[in-house]
Image: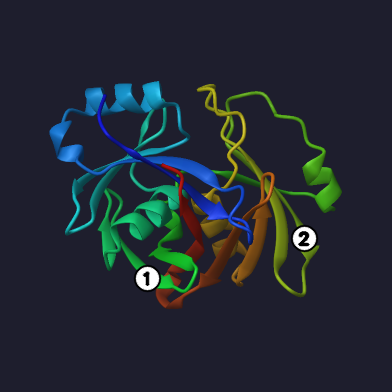
Amino acid sequence: MTDYDVLRVFCGATAGYGNELAVIRNGSTLPNREDRQALAAKLGFSETVFVDDPERGVIDIYTPTLRLPFAGHPCVGTAWLLDVPELVTPAGTVGTRLDGEFTWIEARPEWAPPRTLRQYATAAEVEALPVPPSGEWIYAWAWLDEAAGRVRARAFPGRDDGIEEDEATGAAALLLTARLDRALNITQGAGSQLLTAPQPGGWVEVGGRVVLER
């Protein structure tokens, strides 16, 4: 079995929760896309990252069933692990920075895969949602405190790949930030935290805490 690290990305204030991520640092030893896809399916994480060049930050991202040109929590986690100034993804070059306990990436909303952003009237409605049928990637959200930019969210990938709910989803947070054009403090899933901020020129920053699980 190929060696890999397991991180939790977008952890809560006490380092709990977060979305698990597998990172294969020596991705160049498994160059074939079909082999990478098979390994991502076997590992079963919502995303698995293959690092093709650790010095330049060149990465390749897979879910259990498909390759992604860009994804948020894999970029935040890999940026923390490699401590590089940027990551090179198929979608484009992602800026990165470390700021105390938070790791940030800067990306463009149009790089994010399509998501249905569905607003609800209250956080209680979001928390009570059942897992919807597969077929549509749904990001359910409601204001916890609109004046303060605090959001309650849950994410349902709908891919029928064993991941019924995403604990923390950077790409969807990026899209919501672009739509609302304001900084957000998002509580997602069971207790993950994502911070976001619009940047000049249509860029968006997304940040969170990262913990090395093994």
Residue 127 at x, y = what percent? 79, 43
Q: Which amino acid does the dot numbered 1 rest on?
A: Arg
Figure quadrant of the C terminus: top left
Residue 203 at x, y = what percent? 43, 69
Q: Which residue is mark 1?
A: 97
Residue 208 or 143: which is nearer the viewer? Answer: 208
Residue 95 at x, y = what percent? 33, 67
Q: Does dot 2 land on a helix, a strand or a loop?
A: strand
Residue 109 or 24: which is nearer the viewer? Answer: 24
Query: Sequence order check: which comes first, mark 2 or mark 1?
Result: 1
Q: Write the residue at 50% across / 68% down.
A: 101
Separation (CA) of disc 2 from disc 1? 28 Å
Q: Residue furthest bottom?
A: 200
Q: Write the residue at 55% across / 66% down.
A: 196
The numbered mark at residue 143 is 2
Residue 13 occupies quadrant: bottom right
Figure quadrant of the N terminus: top left
Mark 2, other Cα within 10 Å: few <14 / some 14–19 / many ≥20: some
Q: Residue furthest front?
A: 214
Q: Write the residue at 78% across / 36% down.
A: 129
Q: Is residue 68 left or right of residue 190?
A: left
Decide: is 31 above or below 95: above
Residue 145 at x, y = what percent? 79, 67
Decide: is 50 above or below 33: below
Decide: is 68 above or below 12: above
Number of dots carrying numbers: 2
Residue 68 or 96: which is nearer the viewer? Answer: 96
The numbered mark at residue 132 is none
Q: Does dot 1 land on a helix, a strand or a loop?
A: strand
Q: Write the residue at 53% across / 44% down.
A: 19
Decide: is 143 above or below 17: below
Q: Nearer the viewer, mark 2 or mark 1?
A: 1
